[in-house]
């Protein structure tokens, strides 16, 4: 099972403040543990929403909205992509994570859809297309 593990933004992360050396070191150590255990597939921190944009869809119309975005608690400051056996295992790993920010922080865990989750709607042709795309992406690494 794959899970997207998202570090929720705070006023501090949205201000653009960078982590101190201790937190960078602690997170580096945690990421090494994840990698050694074969759990971590990817992980990155994100710039504040003031440097981002959103594209809103309404039928065929597209509207670009530049950051910053108001609801800090709804934003993501960073993420991991993990391969684990269960949501419970993902939770146990998150509980071992250093607190990403001084004071209160929140990390959200969401399971990633796999091909088999889509049932008959995911036809053999669509499965073959998905496999070709994954091979293309893997070849660029």
Image: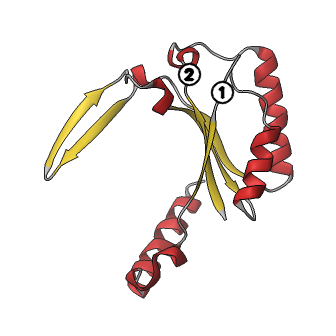
Residue at image point 85% right, 54% down:
37
Image location of residue 60, percent across then percent down: 13, 52
**N-terminal label among 1 and 2:** 2
Residue at image point 70% right, 17% down:
103
Q: Nearer the viewer, residue 126 or 67?
A: 67
Question: In the drawing, does residue 60 fall left or right of residue 78?
Answer: left
Question: In the drawing, does residue 113 fall left or right of residue 120?
Answer: right
On screen, residue 47 above or below 97: above
Q: Secondary structure at mark 2?
A: loop
Question: In the drawing, does residue 82 fall left or right of residue 38?
Answer: left
Note whether residue 36 is visible: yes
Badge 2: residue crowd in 10 Å (few <14, some 14–19, many ≥20): many
Q: Secondary structure at mark 1?
A: loop
Indicate the quadrant where residue 17 lies: top right
Note whether residue 39 is visible: no
Residue at image point 22% right, 46% down:
57
CA–CA distance in space, label 1 to label 2 = 7 Å
Indicate the quadrant where residue 1 lies: bottom right
Q: Nearer the viewer, residue 70 or 68?
A: 70
Q: Which residue is mark 2?
A: 10
Residue at image point 38% right, 22% down:
70
Q: Which residue is mark 1?
A: 105
Pointer 1 and pointer 2: residues touching (CB < 8 Å)? yes
Indicate the quadrant where residue 45 lies: top right
């Amino acid at each position: 099972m794959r899970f997207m593990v998202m570090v929720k933004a705070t006023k501090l992360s949205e201000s653009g403040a960078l982590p101190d050396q201790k937190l960078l070191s602690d997170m580096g150590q945690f990421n090494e543990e994840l990698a050694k255990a074969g759990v971590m597939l990817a992980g990155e921190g994100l710039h504040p929403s003031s440097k981002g944009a959103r594209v809103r869809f309404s039928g065929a119309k597209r509207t670009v909205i530049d950051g910053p975005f108001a609801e800090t608690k709804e934003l993501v400051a960073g993420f991991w992509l993990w391969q684990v056996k269960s949501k419970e295992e993902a939770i146990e790993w998150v509980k071992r994570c250093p607190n990403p920010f001084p004071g209160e922080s929140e990390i959200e865990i969401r399971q990633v859809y796999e091909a088999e989750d889509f049932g008959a709607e995911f036809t053999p042709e669509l499965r073959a297309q998905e496999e070709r795309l994954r091979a293309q992406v893997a070849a660029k690494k």
